[in-house]
Image (spheres, grey):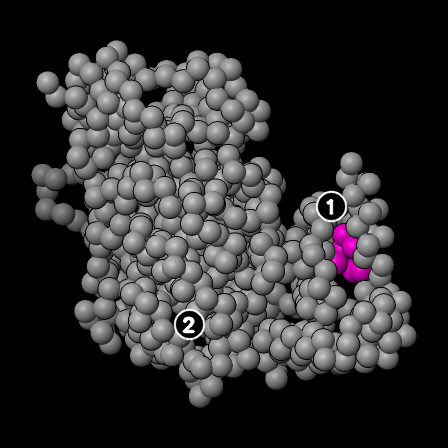
Amino acid sequence: MLRPDKLDDNGRFSSFDNGKILFNKKKNHLPAMGWNSWNAFGSGNTEELTRIMADKIVELGLDKLGYEYVILDDGCYKPERIDGKLSNEENKFPNGFKSLSDYIHSKGLKFGMYNDIGTNLCAGAAVGTCGHERDDAASYIEWGVDFLKVDNCYYPFDNATFSNPENAAFTFAPAIRSIKIVRNEQSREEYTFNAISDGKITGDRAFIENNSVTGIGTYDGTGPEASPVGLRSSELIFNICADNKEIKSVSDNSDKNDNSAEEENFTCLLEIEYQDGKEEGKGNWTQIAVNDDIVFDDFISEDGWPSEKDSDDKNAPDEETKEIKPFEWSKSIKINLKKGSNCIRIMNHRRQENTLNSYARLLKELNELKPENDIIYSACEWGKTHPQNWAYKVCDSWRILNDITFRVGSDGDPGFGAWNQDYTTSVTAQYNKAVIMDEFAGLSKGWNDPDMLMIGMNGLDEVQCRTHMTMWCMMNSPLMLGMDLRRVSANDWMYNIIANKDMISLNQDALGIQAKRIFSTLAEKEPDKEYIRDINRIDVLAKPLSNGDFALSFINVSEEGKNEKISVSIEDIIGYFGEKITRADSYSVKNLWTKEVEENNSGIFEIDGIKACDNVTFRISAIVS
Amino acid sequence: MNIEEFIDFIITEYESGKSKESEKAFQENNDFIREEQLNKFWKNVMSLFSEKMIKENVSRKNAARILYAFYKDVYNESDIDWGSSKKLKDIYECRVCANAIAQMYDNGILESATKEYFGLNDILSSDELMGSALKLLKHDFLQAKEEIAIRNL
């Protein structure tokens, strides 16, 4: 059975905030723009259709507006490897990927492909990169790939889509009832600390249940429930004070070190009273840190491995028949306590760490084989592991949720997209989350990806598509067209939306700042941080631009028209962005959809009523007298 | 019945022209178009499953994918709006087959394992598979669409 890699410090949770980029990932890319086959054709995309789409991009002049990547999504490979290598599905791609890549490059465009960090692709082909990173990197370089979208199905180290649900054993620690420190092995001088009375839970993922602490791990961000903001995981922490006489629990570990004396260490044994599981919230893999040292990072119990079965095994135990294990004591783990205060952390950050490591493995091979490559690397792990915390280290963008639509099109059928619908499958579900994620985006990091555009699919009208475009442009989201471009003609309504130069210029602005939500009719205190899923609201987004201008967007998320007057002042905006916004006596205000320009002398920007699902978006320039 | 046998069964039954829908299709299409459509269906499903995979038993989700491929490629039917399938708690767990499940479930071709769960990975028996295939082949989609439209009013 596959086993997660051992990690070095660069790949650990404790390094997520250090700003360090791994394996020479090149940065400072603006959000990628192009066309991806998935929303248009699903698994039914073909070489012929792809060539036609490339032709249409050039014919419509979309390439001149920045749409440069043509990306093959799932469904393009043979279902199994041939001699360990990826190969083209011959019925759909008869001339192979190099030929298609050459064609796309001959049009002045760039070529993108798709794979998965798991063993299989989401559509089922058993050609995931897991364990094949070297071979696959070589293939992608040989084929002249400029962009890689990498998915997360059939992932062996988490309970991802189509993975064995028992893989949660890798990503959650067991429930913990207590820990024991044994100072003298012979005399068994023991000190026991209760998880509830002596321990402290960080974050809000873990909780107390059955006299123990459970849920030690990271929230699953695939669905729309979990906010992306704040600490997304929990640890169980014991603050312990040790001296020559005793070891005791203290409320915190500040100012308790005896620095006057030479540092004294006590070698002890640590044992944990645990109940392991193989389900979301209760697993087996345990990480233990004493002060700054990781002293254990493995399965606490070898019989707690996920079973060999995969998700297709119908004999998986259901909730009622699942065995509930008793609490038991772990083997002893040698630790060093120092005189004074110590912090023992019991945790499992492997959900994030393993996924980062898997994405890094492919990047490492690509950059070893061709160090000068500048492949745009798009993580599509659907927000499951909160990639906003780590993906900047190896990727250019990261999906924030599961798919925006599950009703993709096919040749002759445009598919279906919704404004507001269950789960993640709508413009608003994706927007609601992405709009508060500006702190994670930037030129030196990368971009939040609320999935591909649904403009041109059934289910969304012109107004909704216009606002969809506005949202994605304001939020610096990658702009991936997802429609059959044969349905677009120059100057029809779809073209006028996707080719709105003023909008694209917001998305591609050199400053690379994702808009911040500075006001929402439903926000209580912090509109830029509060995760609001009720769409019956108006939001105001502001975005500083590189030439000193700023963009301001009033967005009616609701499916009902609103009559209220909404205004924000220049002081409100400066309050969020400081010097990035220019204070002036008057401003030139251009409506980026109607193209009307007005002068504003008040510094108050307002709308008086707004249609359902509509937006009013301005580019505002200070008039310097 | 494995995946290969299931696909063969659908094609054989269709070609025999016994079922209501296939009879209609046979009347409307000439041999060339029929062959083209079946060829498209065959290529489509063969791109989903390798030689090894087609020897495996048919899970409910794969049954949905195969039947849906036939619905699109041979019958050229357009999708209906999702109805009660939205209530299936596991439908979003299968990004590549969610729509196939919804189309086959809402059209009454495939049943769910329980009221709440489709049962993505349940292995279907030969009788269940043949029953669903015959439902698809005999299905009156026009009438079904009218019924669904009335239901959604």
Mark 2 falls on what kind of element?
loop
Residue in the image at 29% along x and 20% along y: A598
- Checking the image for residue B83, the label placed there is 1
**Residue at 35 percent of width and 55 percent of height:** A61
On the image, the x and y values in percent for residue B86 come to 69, 46
* Secondary structure mainly formed by the magenta segment: loop
Q: Is residue B147 above or below residue A110?
A: above
Of the pair A125 and A541, the residue shown nearer to us: A541
Q: Is residue B110 magenta?
A: yes
Q: Are marks 2 and 1 on the same chain?
A: no
3D distance between C-alphas at marks 2 and 1? 37 Å
Q: Is residue A44 above or below residue A212?
A: below
Q: Quadrant of residue A366?
A: bottom left
| Residue B61 can be seen in this image | yes
Q: Reply above or below: A377 against B25.
A: above
User: Which sits in the foreground, A457 or A174?
Assistant: A457
Q: Which chain is indicated by disc 2? A: A
Mark 2 neighbour density, 10 Å: few (under 14) some (14–19) many (20 or more): many
Query: Mark 2 = which residue?
Result: A129
The residue stretch that appears in magenta = B104-111
Q: Chain of mark 1?
A: B
